[in-house]
C-alpha cells in the first residue's frame, strides 16, 4: 500500500518555500540604521513649528552609537521648534534604486553649554572638506553654530521598496 500524501492541498513539493541557507543574515532595524548613521554624511531633520507645520532641513551630524550630535545657530528655526516640542524625525540614506533609507523617531535636547563643550572627537575631520569648500574654519563653526542639539533615537524604522537592500544584510 503506498504511503499517504501528507502535503497540504494544492501544494506541490516545488511550491513549498524553504529558507535560503546561503542568503545573508538580515539585520534588526536598529543595527541596519546604525550602519546608515555611521556611513551617511547628512541626515534630514524634521521638527514641528508651534502651528503644527513641519520643518525639514538637511544637517551635518556625528553619531556615537546612542546619540546624534548636531550644532546649530542658536536662533535657527529648528532650535525654536525644539524649544516648544523636542520630538523629531530623521531620514537618511539614498533613495536611489529601491529606496534604501532609514527613518528614526527621536527626542532632542538643547544643552545649556557651548558646542565646544560637547563636540564629538572626529566631527571636524568628518566635515573638513565640506567646511573648506564653503570657507568655514573650526573657530567660525564653533562661534556660529554655538547651540548643540543632542538627539536620542526612540524608534528605528528602516524602509525600502520591493527588494532587500544591502544595508539590511549582515554582509553590507
Image: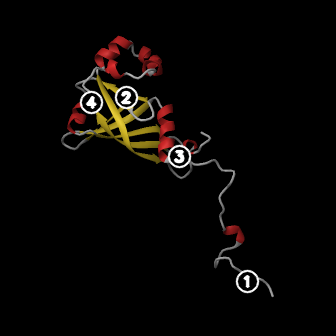
**CA separation in Å, label 2 and label 3:** 29 Å
Q: Percent from the top left, x then y, of residue 43?
A: 41, 34
Q: Give the label, 1 or 3, closer to the camera.
A: 1
Q: Percent from the top left, x then y, of residue 158?
A: 46, 46
**CA separation in Å, label 2 and label 4:** 10 Å
Q: Give the label, 3 or 4, closer to the camera.
A: 4
Lower position in the chain sequence, tag 2 or tag 4 = 2
**CA separation in Å, label 3 and label 4:** 35 Å
List the residue tagged with mark 3: 98
Q: Residues within 10 Å of mark 1 (few under 14, many from 20)?
A: few
For mark 3, give the secondary structure. loop
Q: Is residue 9 left or right of residue 158?
A: right
Q: Percent from the top left, x then y, of residue 29?
A: 48, 46
Q: Given contact means CB atoms under 8 Å apart, are the residues at marks 3 and 4 in contact? A: no
Lower position in the chain sequence, tag 4 or tag 1 = 1
Q: Is residue 69 left or right of residue 30?
A: left
Seen in the picture, residue 111 relative to 139 is either above or below; the reply is: below
**CA separation in Å, label 4 and label 1:** 69 Å
Q: Residues within 10 Å of mark 2 (few under 14, many from 20)?
A: many
Specify the label residue 69 is tagged with: 2
Lower position in the chain sequence, tag 3 or tag 4 = 3
List the residue tagged with mark 4: 110
List the residue tagged with mark 1: 4
Can you tell which quarter of the image residue 85 is in? top left
Can you tell which quarter of the image residue 134 is in? top left
Q: Give the label, 2 or 3, closer to the camera.
A: 2
- Residue at the image position 73 percent from the left and 83 percent from the top: 4
Question: Furthest residue to the bottom?
Answer: 1
Q: From this viewpoint, is residue 94 visible?
A: no
Amino acid at each position: 500500500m503506498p504511503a499517504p500524501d501528507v502535503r497540504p492541498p494544492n501544494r506541490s513539493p516545488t511550491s513549498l518555500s524553504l529558507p535560503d541557507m546561503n542568503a545573508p543574515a538580515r539585520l534588526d532595524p536598529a543595527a541596519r540604521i546604525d550602519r546608515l548613521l555611521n556611513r551617511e554624511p547628512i541626515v534630514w531633520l524634521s521638527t514641528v513649528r508651534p502651528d503644527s507645520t513641519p520643518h525639514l532641513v538637511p544637517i551635518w551630524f556625528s553619531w556615537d552609537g546612542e546619540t546624534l550630535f548636531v550644532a546649530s545657530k542658536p536662533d535657527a528655526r529648528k532650535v525654536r521648534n525644539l524649544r516648544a516640542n523636542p520630538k523629531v524625525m530623521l531620514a537618511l540614506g539614498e533613495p536611489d534604486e529601491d529606496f534604501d533609507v532609514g527613518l528614526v523617531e527621536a527626542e532632542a535636547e538643547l544643552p545649556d553649554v557651548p558646542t565646544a563643550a560637547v563636540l564629538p572627537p572626529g566631527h571636524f575631520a568628518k566635515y573638513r572638506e565640506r567646511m573648506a569648500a564653503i570657507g568655514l574654519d573650526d573657530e567660525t563653526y564653533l562661534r556660529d553654530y554655538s547651540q548643540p542639539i543632542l538627539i536620542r533615537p526612540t524608534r528605528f524604522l528602516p524602509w525600502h521598496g520591493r527588494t532587500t537592500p544591502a544595508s539590511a544584510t549582515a554582509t553590507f
